[in-house]
Image: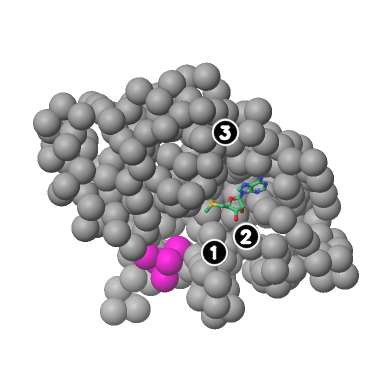
Amino acid sequence: MLTLVATPIGNLGDLSPRALEAMRSADAVLCEDTRVTGALLARQGVSVPLVPLHEHNEAAQVPRLLERLAAGEKLALASDAGTPLMSDPGYRLVRAAIAAGVPVTAVPGPNAAVMALTLSGLPPHPFLFVGFLPVRGGARAAELGRLRAAERAGLRTTLVFYEAPHRLDESLAAMAETLGADRPAAVARELTKRFEEVRRGSLAELAAWYARHPARGEVVVVVGPPEAEAPAGEADLDARLREALAAGMSVRDAAAAVAAATGVARKLAYARALALSRAGR
Ligand code: SAM
């Protein structure tokens, strides 16, 4: 049995009795940083064998861990903070355990993305958890461009990003530029901790604020969905379809998404998408 255990994102009072019990009763706790999880458990008077499992060794560790699980051991997986796998290690192991028929369960608990979403005052669903954007400016702009293309093709969801505090202002500026300066947004900082704060405003306002007041601590950025856009004219229809196709959508998906976003008949959108796709080859 593999148990994914959520741990606090700042406030130690959020460690649940079930989370503690799952780790106490495990044959080993797999963790990102044995010092962090070791200290969390030591504070509760618990001593369990700890096995490091992080980005750099996960692929190599999986076969060994599967052998232990197959032999009937109980393993728990915890990350430094919050819910494992959510911008944290564990996905490869979970996928391999499922494929091997090992039972997988979880003790749910803190997660910064969901907490920020619920405090943002923005529509809670549908939402898209993006995680961290690329660090480099060009790659970040390209990723935001792909999101914007999907929005132009009809995607209407609240977006949730993790970000490092020293990159917050430049990321907000890039979001304002690509997603729209007026988009309603929120920055949730130091959640569950003493200086917890949620600042709400447009992307442009938040970018300007954090350019003047550098953020400290941990942050989540939540961006509300785009406004419904005016019905598309012919040129606009082609532009949207081109963007959707360039973002990797199939002709059929691009047509369906753009038709839904613009109210244009699906047949017409499909015919244009097909023509554009052929012309682009
Ligand atoms: N697995 C974690 C979870 O479930 O939230 C997230 C791990 S990810 C490596 C760390 C990022 O999560 C931080 O850079 C920040 O964006 C966000 N985060 C974690 N704790 C937070 C907190 N207390 N307040 C705001 N954001 C937090």
Camera-side mark, 1 or 3: 3
Front-most of residues 121 and 81: 81
Relative placement, left or right, of 234 versus 51 is right
Disc 1 residue type?
Answer: Leu
Whichever of labels 2 and 3 marks the residue nearer the N terminus, that label is 3
Crowding near the residue tagged with mark 2, few <14, some 14–19, many ≥20 C-alpha atoms within 10 Å: many
Give the vertical position of 155 relative to 170 (above or below).
Answer: above
Q: Residue at x 43, y 39 (%)?
A: 78
Residue 40, picture quadrant: top right
The magenta segment is: 244-248
- Asked if residue 124 is among those painted magenta in the image, a careful observer would answer no
What residue did someone put label 1 on? 133
Q: Residue at x 81, y 60 (%)?
A: 206
Q: Residue at x 28, y 30 (%)?
A: 27
Residue 162, picture quadrant: bottom right
Q: Secondary structure at mark 2?
A: strand
On the image, the x and y values in percent for residue 259 come to 48, 50
Give the vertical position of 108 relative to 224 (above or below).
Answer: above
Give the vertical position of 180 relative to 43 (above or below).
Answer: below
Front-most of residues 64 and 42: 42
Q: Main secondary structure of the magenta part?
A: helix
Tell me the tag on residue 43.
Answer: 3
Measure the C-alpha gap from mark 1 to mark 3: 34 Å
Q: Secondary structure at mark 1?
A: loop
Tell me the tag on residue 163.
Answer: 2
Crowding near the residue tagged with mark 3, few <14, some 14–19, many ≥20 C-alpha atoms within 10 Å: few
Give the vertical position of 250 relative to 37 (above or below).
Answer: below
Check contact, mark 2 vs mark 1: CB within 8 A. yes
